[in-house]
Amino acid sequence: MNTPASLTEPSSDRRLMDSIYRRQRHIYDLSRRYYLLGRDRLVAELKPPAGGSVLEIGCGTGRNLIAAAAAYPQARFFGLDLSEEMLKTARAALARHRLSHAVDIAAADAVDFEPLRLFGVPVFSRIFFSYTLSMIPPWERAIAHAWKQVAPGGQLFIVDFGQSEALPPPFRAVLWWWLAKFHVAPRAALHHVLAEMAREERADLDFTPLYGGYAWYAVLTRPAAAAPRPAPDGRETFPPFAAT
Ligand SMILES: C[S@@+](CC[C@H](N)C(=O)[O-])C[C@H]1O[C@@H](n2cnc3c(N)ncnc32)[C@H](O)[C@@H]1O
């Protein structure tokens, strides 16, 4: 039986990411070091529980996963990215740091990835997006899909370009003109969307503008699983997943 072309051919989104990063990936870590701000703070605040699982969506060259796997050797790490080109660099970097055993990476789309099929993991204690939502046109869908994979008591972290709200307007104009060349669009509605989610899901939202709004940093915490309740037959029932 022939496999449908839609399952074998790269999507236009993936072709676009591959075309942006085919050459950029070689200078990515060096060139982004000084302007993708807030990433180190995110890694420092991840603090997964022992035996926990951490997923980066849009992991790129693996830079954040490498830092996180080194900082939290007791956790398991996973990364996905739409661009196979970026993943080539990530695989090489993981091997160089001798972390291939600790970090599992795969090609997938943020809006419809299946964690069980990709990694054999149903939910994660921590999921993060670092400078990825600004490159995903259906970014709200990506957040909603990620949130479904956060375990009870788990957390979703986001760091990305903000609205540069406290910086001089000409700075913002030049920055956005330049970012647009890389198909990057800061998401003005990010705070609003996360606040709505937090309200609907009874989650806790911590939203912090960094460096005059150059970057926005958010942490959404899912409530812990409800305490076990006695079933009618007297046995205790537990929620299906723990935040590990
Ligand atoms: C600016 S890079 C950020 C890489 C890394 N997170 C970091 O902080 O250095 C954005 C990454 O998002 C990936 N990406 C874009 N759209 C995606 C999608 N729909 N699903 C998964 N990854 C995506 C790109 O291929 C790229 O590697």
Image (cartoon, rainbow, N blue to C red):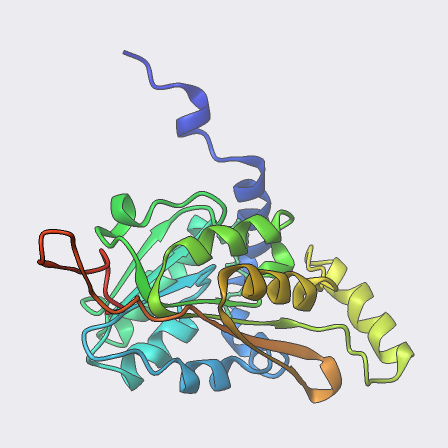
Q: Eyeballing the image, is 70 above or below 19?
A: below
Q: Could you tell me residue 215's position as x and y percent?
A: 66, 78
Identify the residue shown where x is 58% and y is 64%.
Answer: 199
Q: Quadrant of the N terminus?
A: top left
Q: Eyeballing the image, is 146 above or below 70?
A: above
Identify the residue shown where x is 69% and y is 65%.
Answer: 192
Which of 154 and 42 lies nearest the eye of the viewer?
A: 154
Which of 4 and 119 lies nearest the eye of the viewer?
A: 119
Where, by quadrant of the figure, is residue 160 drawn?
Answer: bottom right
Q: Eyeballing the image, is 153 above or below 2?
A: below
Which of 47 and 172 lies nearest the eye of the viewer?
A: 47
Left or right of 73, for residue 137: right
Left or right of 140, for residue 59: left
Q: Could you tell me residue 13's position as x and y percent?
A: 57, 42
Which of 92 and 147 lies nearest the eye of the viewer?
A: 147
Q: Quadrant of the C terminus?
A: bottom left
Q: Could you tell me residue 109's position as x and y percent?
A: 46, 46
Left or right of 42, for residue 213: right
